Image (cartoon, rainbow, N blue to C red):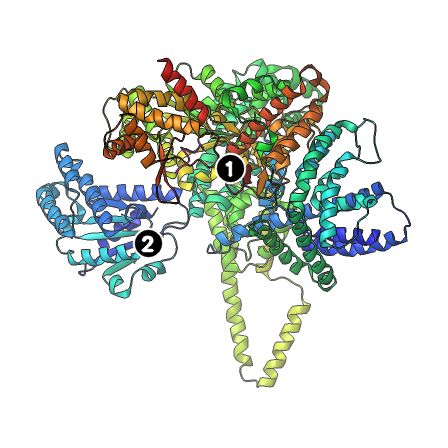
């Protein structure tokens, strides 16, 4: 987070009779910024100064409002500790405010609180006699330049009695400061730049902490993860929304999957297995993954699994254990593979671990072309690269205490040792070759060329690998075998339904709905909702028995910007009378016309409510279409 | 000539199509036309079918192409977003795939039934006659097995007078009456729709044509000018296209794509640029159907038996099963928004009665014209929190409420808002305030939206305040309540409201003032048959009032009038001669009622 770095920044830089300005470029995302700035404010308030004010551009159209807002917020933020009556006085005073009054207020306040300061041992007191005022401008770009310039110039005059630190939130690039402020103004500032973390890094952290760990049993299936990351990357860049999506999938999983009772940590799940009801057992037997598992067993065991409840429960227990082990291995190998692939040129398997994870969830990764090309690239790695990667992998494996993969760590250690010994040998070789080259030194250019050519020929013809190449091949094969053994997609695991949430479409329907298309479908194709055979029709055409509003809508699509109500109502009447033909004999035609007219009125006013048309004065008895095109 | 006309019509048919298909079509058409020349005689119906088939093919292709364009756009956009990020490889195809898969998967969610290409497709230039045509087509559809009348369908009859007139004027083509059927194709896109309809012309709409053709005789003359223009404007571009077609034939596909998008843009401006819109000039007055008031409308509609009640019930039951889920999700900090066609008021009402009985809840009818955020906040502070004080501003009130709810976590409140997107609540400030309310942990919001563009109310910030979960609830139930307050186009505002307010205001006035007002009413009623009546001039009024001993100076009269004006009982207008005219902006029926009541009391 930017907070810690910013608060640190406040101490490092000396005043220099300049105002310090710290700018935090934060990027396009809006929703998370509030959180960032809120935590920044809190951090500042706790560590640096009680006087932290944040302003937004929409509050400050001009200098007067700017100051007013500043004064009222500043005074509010410190009177919290003091008596309430004072705050009332303050708010009444706010009609008149200037920088002078502000600095005199500041003097009085700091003198009042001065005795307090040493007791609280504020770190800031070592540099300033009194804590500075921090002003946060969340959205620098939307402030008017004049207000900013004026404020900076004015406050620079008062800097001695009114120490001020500005924090700008910048969504674009830092150059904007110089665009907004002329040199004369920006030279009054002492600018320090802090880059907040990109939201994608936050995403990686969230995924790393929540999904790529065995700590939480709940997992997302490939499609769900894909949808959530896509909403994040293509729609809003908002971690908050991503977390909301995670929450919703958690909720949906536990709400809709009856077997989610077993989705908890292993010991708890084992306890719960014993209490499974008959119904739940039956549910488990019906799970497709479990059925596949059963089919693989011997016939006696099959019978036992399907009939004996006790036997089933034991089996479930062992299956859950297997699943747990599978996950532990899975994530270790995944991280290890990520170490290898994340540094390859062009990133055939993606740069972020989440992309790798998605591919692995989706299918057998070793069947994919990208994997093959990645392996090929791995076979061309230089030694030092390979060694650093191996060291990282070694750390990954070391971090886990799992026994199965303990041997893997050992294998990697061996590889590393071999590489090092290779190093030593290479040095020796170098020494010898160095001697040789000394011998060659005295030849002339022609001979040198010749010998070089010979060496080249030699190298090409002799396919014999060097020892390093052989070792590299070994390492790559080793990694490949690890992947093939442990990175099986979760669908292959029995009972994966317990842990994995896969109803991607519900997630999408609730998070990223398309109300306009729903409306369109309802109006164009009522059969989609009302499963009545009478409503069945070909594409682009609706039967005349459809709901009134659908008919009116369909008719209005035929018009351009203006619609004549009379024409419309006549057309409507034609359709509706045709539909009613059969049962209309009972009432008189006049009455029927009245009713049809009433129905038309209703349909029209409903369309108006939905925003398809609006009344217009361009022509009498006309309405204007508000949409153009199909909807 | 027969064939020539056909060619003409074909080119006009194409005028609305995209360039790409225009090219394809033109070449195809030329081929076909060659073939046509060999044929000696072609029956009317064959010709029609021919046209229809071809149009259909083109239409299909067009749609597919638009789909392509759309996906292209989807893919492109994110690339801009991520430009600054160090060339991370994003799997665009995957994204599109996932979207596509979802569309197939989502069985419950109707939203995805067909992709966006249709929803956002472009509107062709529409012809004035098309609605009537489509209507008669729609009227036909279900009765497929009624005896087929191939000779002359009455609908075609209707069109002849106008079309032939238009043509004869503009094209100087001598038209004989027996060439009727070709002219049909002058309304290009009207036919386009028909290809789906099997050509079964029943007698069922003979009634329609009868009723219509009377009008049409009259209207046709009015139309003549308009139709001429239409035909001309259609002709010119189409001819240009014929010329340009061979030139562009060889363009590579890339260029075509660009052309296509620019063509879409062109179409948009074509549809919107011309200030003149061609519609018929008929008015409702000619229809002799009086404006209904709310009450009669309701009575009439109650006689209509709702169709598909079984299916509707099933739909509703489906949604009712979600109630407990909603409740859970509300409690977990999400807020719920319902969308989809049909009034969701009953559904929410049932939700309220089934699950919210035991909790404090506030129901807000957003469609009510008098609703405002202030009144929502007031009802929360006064009814829910029992606070009697007043607040300086809405924001103060909001702060107070927020603090109250934050302090006391045992406090819970359900907010049900019907039509969150109504006129009164859709403003930015209102939405901000409601959003802030809903973001509180112990205020649960469930709302419905209906308007087509309702989601545009919320930017990212507001959406994160609301924390919506979207639920599609298409009910098809009529918006009875929602539209009843609306100042609807065809519904006469019932007189009851103004009448009662009239009596109320008048009762509080002095007898003299009442007398003044009565004078004005009488004068207005006396002149109600005079169409050029613009009001009673102030001088005349003063004279009359003086004669009736109601006022003694024009100052007193002016004081009275100010009073009336404040209550919106009268309106003043400056006439052309600069004299002030006074008018009561209430319809005459109400005024008569009022006078009768006055005399009774």
Q: Are marks 1 and 2 on the same chain?
A: yes
Is residue B596 in view from this perspective? yes
* Mark 2, secondary structure of its residue: loop
Within 10 Å of disc 1 (Cα), the crowding (few <14, some 14-19, many 20+) is some
- Label 2 sits on residue: A194
Q: In the image, residue A559 lies at what x, y percent? A: 62, 41
For disc 1, the chain is: A
Give whichever of B579, B181 is nearer the camera.
B579
| B134 with respect to A427 (left or right) | right
Identity of the residue drawn at 43% across and 27% down: B526
Identity of the residue drawn at 64% across and 23% down: A593
How many numbered circles does the render carry?
A: 2
Q: Which residues are magenta?
A: B419-427
Q: Is residue B41 magenta?
A: no
* Mark 1, secondary structure of its residue: strand
Compute the Cα span from label 1 to label 2: 54 Å
For disc 2, the chain is: A
Return the mark for residue A7: none
Return the mark for residue A615: 1
């Amino acid at each position: 987070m930017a907070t810690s770095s910013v608060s640190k920044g406040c101490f490092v830089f000396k005043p220099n009779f300049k105002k310090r300005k710290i700018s935090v470029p934060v990027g396009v995302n809006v929703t998370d910024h509030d959180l960032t700035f809120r935590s920044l404010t809190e951090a500042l308030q706790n560590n640096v100064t009680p006087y932290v004010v944040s302003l937004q551009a929409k509050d400050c159209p001009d200098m007067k409002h700017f100051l007013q807002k500043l004064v009222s917020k500043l005074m509010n933020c410190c009177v919290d500790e003091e008596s309430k009556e004072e705050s009332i006085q303050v708010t009444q005073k706010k009609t008149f405010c200037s920088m002078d009054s502000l600095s005199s207020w500041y003097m009085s306040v700091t003198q009042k609180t001065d005795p307090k300061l040493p007791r609280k041992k504020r770190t800031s007191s070592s540099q300033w006699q009194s804590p500075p005022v921090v002003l946060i401008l969340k959205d620098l770009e939307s402030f008017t330049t004049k207000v900013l310039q004026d404020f900076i110039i004015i406050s620079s005059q008062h800097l001695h009695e009114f120490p001020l630190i500005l924090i700008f939130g910048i969504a674009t690039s830092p150059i904007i400061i110089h665009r907004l402020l002329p040199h004369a103004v920006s030279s009054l500032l002492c600018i320090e730049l802090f880059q907040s973390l990109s939201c994608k890094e936050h995403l990686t952290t969230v995924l790393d902490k929540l999904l790529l760990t065995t700590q939480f049993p709940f997992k997302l299936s490939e499609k769900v993860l894909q949808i959530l990351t896509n909403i994040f990357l293509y729609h809003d860049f908002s971690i908050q929304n991503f977390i909301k999506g995670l929450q919703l999938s958690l909720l949906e999983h536990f709400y809709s999957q009856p077997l989610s009772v077993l989705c908890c940590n292993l010991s708890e799940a084992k306890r719960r297995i014993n209490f499974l009801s008959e119904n739940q057992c039956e549910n488990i037997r019906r799970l497709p993954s479990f059925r596949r598992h059963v089919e693989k067993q011997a016939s006696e065991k099959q019978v036992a699994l399907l009939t004996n409840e006790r036997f089933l429960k034991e089996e479930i227990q062992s299956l859950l254990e297997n699943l747990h082990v599978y996950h532990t291995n899975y994530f270790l190998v995944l991280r290890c593979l990520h170490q290898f692939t994340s540094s390859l040129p062009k990133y055939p398997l993606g740069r972020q671990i989440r992309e790798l994870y998605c591919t692995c969830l989706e299918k057998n990764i070793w069947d994919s072309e990208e994997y093959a090309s990645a392996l090929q690239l791995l076979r061309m790695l230089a030694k030092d690269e390979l060694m650093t990667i191996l060291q990282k992998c070694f750390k990954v494996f070391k971090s886990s205490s799992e026994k199965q993969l303990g041997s893997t760590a050992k294998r990697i250690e061996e590889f590393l040792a071999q590489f090092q010994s290779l190093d030593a040998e290479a040095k020796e070789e170098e020494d010898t070759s160095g001697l040789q080259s000394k011998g060659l030194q005295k030849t002339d250019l022609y001979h040198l060329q010749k010998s070089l050519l010979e060496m080249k020929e030699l190298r090409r013809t002799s396919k014999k690998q060097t020892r390093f190449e052989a070792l590299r091949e070994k390492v790559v094969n080793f990694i490949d075998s690890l992947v093939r053994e442990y990175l099986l997609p979760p669908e292959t695991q029995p009972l994966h339904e317990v842990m994995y949430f896969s109803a991607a479409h519900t997630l999408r329907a609730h998070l990223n709905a398309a109300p306009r298309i729903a409306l369109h479908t309802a109006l164009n194709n009522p059969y989609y909702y009302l499963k009545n055979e009478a409503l069945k029709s070909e594409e682009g055409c609706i039967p005349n028995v459809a709901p009134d509003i659908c008919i009116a809508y369909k008719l209005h699509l035929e018009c351009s910007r203006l619609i004549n109500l009379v024409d419309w109502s006549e057309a409507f009447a034609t359709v509706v009378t045709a539909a009613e033909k059969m049962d209309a004999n009972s009432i008189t035609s006049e009455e029927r016309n009245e009713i049809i007219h009433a129905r038309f009125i209703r349909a029209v006013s409903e369309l108006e409510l939905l925003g398809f048309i609006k009344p217009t004065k361009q022509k009498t008895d006309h309405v204007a279409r508000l949409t153009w095109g199909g909807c | 000539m027969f064939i020539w006309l056909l060619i003409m019509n074909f080119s006009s048919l194409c005028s609305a199509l995209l360039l790409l298909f225009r090219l394809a079509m033109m070449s195809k058409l030329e081929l076909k036309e060659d073939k046509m020349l060999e044929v000696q005689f072609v029956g009317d119906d064959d010709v029609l079918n021919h046209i229809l088939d071809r149009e259909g093919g083109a239409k299909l292709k067009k749609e597919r192409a638009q789909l392509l364009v759309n996906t292209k756009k989807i893919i492109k956009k994110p690339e801009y977003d991520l430009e600054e990020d160090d060339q991370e490889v994003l799997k665009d195809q995957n994204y599109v795939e996932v979207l596509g898969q979802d569309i197939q998967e989502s069985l419950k969610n109707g939203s995805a039934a067909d992709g966006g290409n249709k929803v956002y497709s472009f509107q062709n230039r529409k012809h004035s006659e098309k609605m009537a045509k489509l209507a008669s087509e729609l009227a036909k559809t279900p009765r497929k097995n009624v005896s087929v009348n191939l000779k002359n369908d009455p609908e075609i009859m209707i069109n002849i007078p106008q079309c032939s007139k238009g043509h004869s004027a503009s094209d100087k083509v001598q038209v004989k009456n027996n060439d009727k059927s070709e002219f049909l194709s002058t309304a290009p896109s009207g036919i386009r729709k028909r290809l789906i309809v099997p050509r079964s012309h029943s007698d069922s709409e003979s009634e329609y044509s009868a009723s219509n053709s009377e009008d049409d005789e009259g209207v046709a003359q009015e139309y003549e000018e308009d139709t001429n223009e239409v035909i001309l404007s259609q002709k010119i571009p189409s001819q240009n296209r014929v010329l340009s077609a061979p030139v562009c034939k060889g363009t590579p596909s890339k260029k075509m794509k660009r052309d296509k998008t620019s063509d879409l843009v062109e179409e948009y401006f074509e549809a919107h640029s011309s200030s003149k819109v061609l519609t018929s000039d008929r008015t409702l007055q000619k229809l002799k159907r009086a404006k209904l008031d709310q009450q009669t409308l309701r009575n009439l509609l109650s006689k209509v038996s709702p169709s598909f009640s079984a299916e509707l019930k099933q739909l509703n039951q489906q949604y009712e099963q979600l109630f407990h889920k909603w409740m859970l999700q509300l409690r977990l900090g999400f807020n719920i928004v319902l969308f989809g066609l049909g009034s969701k008021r009953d559904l929410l009402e049932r939700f309220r009665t089934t699950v919210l009985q035991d909790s404090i809840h506030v129901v807000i009818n957003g469609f009510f014209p008098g609703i405002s955020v202030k009144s929502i906040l007031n009802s929360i502070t006064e009814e829910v929190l029992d606070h009697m004080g007043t607040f300086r501003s809405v924001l103060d009130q909001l702060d107070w409420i927020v603090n109250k709810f934050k302090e006391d976590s045992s406090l819970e409140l359900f907010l049900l808002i019907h039509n969150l997107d109504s006129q009164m609540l859709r403003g930015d400030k209102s939405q901000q305030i409601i959003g802030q309310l809903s973001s509180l942990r112990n205020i649960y919001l469930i709302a419905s939206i209906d308007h087509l563009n309702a989601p545009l109310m919320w930017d990212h910030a507001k959406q994160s305040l609301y924390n919506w979960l979207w639920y599609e609830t298409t009910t098809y139930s009529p918006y009875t309540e929602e539209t009843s307050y609306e100042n609807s186009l065809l519904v006469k505002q019932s007189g009851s409201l103004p009448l009662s307010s009239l009596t109320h205001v008048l009762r509080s006035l002095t007898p003299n003032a009442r007398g003044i007002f009565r004078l004005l009413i009488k004068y207005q009623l006396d002149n109600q048959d005079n169409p050029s009546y613009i009001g009673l001039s102030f001088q005349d009024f003063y004279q009359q009032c003086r004669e009736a001993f109601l006022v003694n100076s024009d100052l007193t009269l002016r004081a009275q009038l100010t009073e009336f004006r404040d209550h919106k009982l009268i309106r003043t207008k400056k006439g052309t001669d600069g004299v002030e005219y006074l008018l009561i902006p209430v319809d005459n029926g109400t005024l008569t009622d009022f006078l009768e009541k006055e005399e009774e009391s």
